[in-house]
Image (cartoon, rainbow, N blue to C red):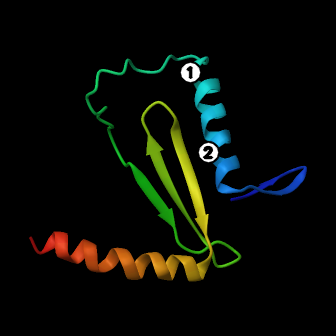
Amino acid sequence: MKLVAQAGEFKYSAQQVEELALFFGQLRAQMSPGLPEQSGDVVALEGDRWEAYKKMQDGSARIYFRVPGMGWSFIQLEENRCNELAAVLNPRLQAVQNQ
């Protein structure tokens, strides 16, 4: 993962990203409004759950995901990674639509 901030650019390994996610989850649990109780049921979300912006200035794309209790997060993929992802997902989406 690459994070770009005012202080510069930082690169993280998968392990470091997992540790950051846990840290932010713990931090969010201490903030208001509180997190919903975990009942084992899926929390229903109103409105869009994902959104994608195709072309950033560098040719990459951002895919935003809305997660209950955490809000919006995004991943940014380079153009060639977007093409690889589309090649994997498009046939699967077509198969689901044809069922």
Return the x and y of residue 83 as percentages of the image width and height. Answer: 49, 82
Residue 17, compared with residue 20, is above or below; it is below
Find disc 2 in the rendering and name its residue.
18
Q: Is residue 72 above or below residue 90?
A: above
Residue at disc 2, secondary structure: helix
Q: Give the residue displayed 38% in from the left and 48% down from the top.
A: 49
Q: Where does the image place residue 40, in percent across and percent down from the top left? A: 28, 26
Q: Amino acid at mark 1?
A: Ala
Q: Residues within 10 Å of mark 1 (few under 14, many from 20)?
A: some
Query: Who comes first in sequence, dot 2 or dot 1?
Result: 2
Q: Secondary structure at mark 1?
A: helix
Marks 2/1: CA–CA distance: 17 Å
Which residue lies under the disc numbered 1? Answer: 29
- Please state which of residues 57 and 26 is positioned toward the viewer in this rendering: 26
Instruction: Tell me the quarter of the picture where residue 21 sits.
Output: top right
The x and y percentages for residue 58 are: 70, 77
- Amino acid on which disc 2 is placed: Glu
Q: Tell me what residue is drawn at x 61 percent, y 64 percent.
A: 76
